[in-house]
Amino acid sequence: PDIFANAAMSSGVMLTTGDINWAPGPNIDDGSALITSWNPNQENAQVPPVQRNLNPSLDHFDVNRLSFNFTVPANTGGITVQYVFASEEYPEFVFEDFNDSFAFVVDGVNAALVPNSNSPVTIDSINQFVNSAYYRDNDTNPNAINIEYDGLTHVLTANVFAALNPNLSTHSMIFSIADVGDSFWDSAVFIRADSFQVPEPTTLGVLACLGAMALRRKR
């Protein structure tokens, strides 16, 4: 099955703390998990500081990240990117210590925020109780969405332009996802292809492709 279509996307890049082959539905497991590391000190070092600060007292595991640099054409009015966050931590571990996190870091600033707020996107900030308008339940009715994850967001849009450092000529982007508190129960982020929107998209489009080609798991 097309996991991107089931995540409300036609295609794109997927980052997961587990095995990408476990993502297609139907949802037959309340807690799929692939453990790739038991070294929290090494994993914590791979997490961008702004993401690490979301859970500063907890260790991070199974970190997966995609990073690249880009330039912005002069007089650009806005840059956005669309994504979906999904997790097996839903719904059992909402408001528990196992708050798997995703960060879309632009020049050191997290642009992955709950719409109309400054709250970072995590299982605690979008779920069946909080900001539920942005949440899709795939646990109560496991056949609702043909994907393994028990819950996922609707397609969200990150405002890249608002996070840009105006003093830089070359900017950095890091997509990073991690298990938090333990290595169990996988999470994922789907980044929509061609969702980088900018008046002159050539530079970003080429760099995004190069970044996708360089996708690798950090350990």
Image (cartoon, grey):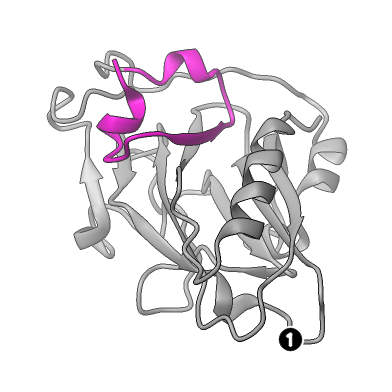
Residue for point 66% across, 82% down: 74
Above or below residue 92? Residue 31 is: above
Q: Nearer the viewer, residue 204 or 33?
A: 204
Q: Quadrant of the C terminus?
A: top right
**6 with respect to 181 (left or right):** left
Q: Which residues are magenta?
A: 1-24
Does the magenta segment cover residue 19? yes
Q: At which x and y percent is residue 205?
A: 59, 51
Residue for point 41% across, 21% down: 23
Residue identified by numbered label 1 = 166
Q: Nearer the viewer, residue 196 or 58?
A: 196
Q: At which x and y percent is residue 163?
A: 62, 77
Q: Nearer the viewer, residue 74 or 84?
A: 74
Does the magenta segment cover residue 141? no
Q: Is residue 115 visible?
A: yes
**171 with respect to 102 (left or right):** right
Above or below residue 147? Residue 115 is: below
Q: At which x and y percent is residue 142?
A: 18, 24
